[in-house]
Image (cartoon, rainbow, N blue to C red):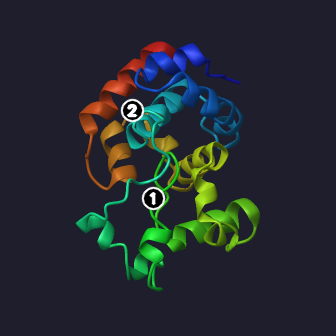
């Protein structure tokens, strides 16, 4: 089993604070292998994506404006946001942003066998344990190890982001992670 060290994570994510690394590293080391993110190649790709999505472990929830895109969460049936206020209630949380009531329900069903657990307590996804767990869950559910194993970082980024937003930064973190973890 591969365990990340504080020093490795700090080298890979130089903007992460020592405190945030200390908060997340026990959950990363515990949960990554449980979700099959268990090779250097997979871990490097995962940390690169999480590094970008979380602002290098600084953010575990979406910064709410609301922006025009965030206003669009309201009433989106594909996200399960059908009740007024669902947009902000089920905003992106976790190290890979879990967004929308339907995704909170699916995560709750898979993790707790209770689809209302996280819809009744969405702020729990902001805690270090569940912030890591949602990212691992999403990774496994979307079968992202396949892209990590093949070195297809562009497709991997699109599967997480829907496009190539922040691709250069993700790529930079990925290159550092591959060097540190080899």
- Residue at 64 percent across and 37 percent down: it is 32
Q: Left or right of 43: which side holds 175?
A: left
Q: Left or right of 95: which side holds 52?
A: left
Residue at mark 1: 92
Q: Secondary structure at mark 2?
A: loop
Q: Nearer the viewer, residue 152 or 63?
A: 63
User: In the rendered view, would you say 124 is above or below 1?
Assistant: below
Q: Quadrant of residue 3?
A: top right
Earlier sequence position, callout 2 versus callout 1: 1
Which residue of the protein is positioned furthest toward the right in this rendering? 113
Rendering coords of residue 126 (x, y %): 57, 51
Q: Quadrant of the N terminus?
A: top right
Q: Quadrant of residue 116?
A: bottom right
Rendering coords of residue 69 (x, y %): 27, 66
User: In the rendered view, would you say 109 is above or below 53?
Assistant: below
- Residue at 50 percent across and 47 percent down: it is 60
User: In the rendered view, would you say 73 is above or below 112?
Assistant: below
Q: How many marks?
A: 2
Label 2 to label 1: alpha-carbon separation: 27 Å
Q: Nearer the viewer, residue 172 or 147?
A: 172
Q: Nearer the viewer, residue 141 or 60?
A: 60
Q: Secondary structure at mark 1?
A: loop
**Image mark for residue 151:** 2
* Mark 1 neighbour class, 10 Å CA radius: few under 14, some 14 to 19, many 20 or more: many
Question: Answer yes or no: do the residues labelled 2 and 1 have beta carbons within 8 Å?
Answer: no
Q: Quadrant of residue 111?
A: bottom right
- Residue at 49 percent across and 19 percent down: it is 10
**Image mark for residue 152:** none
Which residue of the protein is positioned furthest toward the bottom in this rendering? 83
Rendering coords of residue 139 (x, y %): 53, 48
User: In the rendered view, would you say 76 is above or below 163?
Assistant: below
Rendering coords of residue 140 (x, y %): 57, 50
């Amino acid at each position: 089993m591969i365990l990340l060290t504080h020093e490795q994570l700090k080298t890979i994510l130089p903007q992460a604070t020592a405190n945030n690394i200390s908060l997340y590293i026990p959950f990363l080391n515990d949960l990554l292998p449980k979700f099959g993110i268990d090779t250097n190649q997979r871990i490097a790709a995962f940390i690169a994506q999480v590094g970008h999505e979380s602002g290098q472990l600084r953010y575990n929830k979406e910064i709410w404006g609301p922006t025009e895109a965030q206003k669009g969460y309201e009433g989106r049936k594909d996200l399960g946001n059908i009740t007024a206020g669902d947009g902000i209630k089920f905003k992106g949380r976790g190290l890979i942003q879990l967004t929308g009531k339907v995704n909170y329900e699916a995560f709750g069903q898979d993790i707790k066998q209770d689809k209302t657990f996280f819809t009744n307590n969405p702020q729990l996804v902001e805690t270090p344990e569940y912030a890591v767990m949602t990212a691992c869950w999403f990774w496994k559910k979307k079968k992202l190890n396949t892209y990590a194993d093949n070195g297809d970082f562009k497709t991997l980024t699109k599967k997480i982001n829907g496009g190539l937003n922040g691709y250069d930064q993700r790529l930079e973190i990925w290159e550092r992670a591959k060097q540190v973890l080899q």
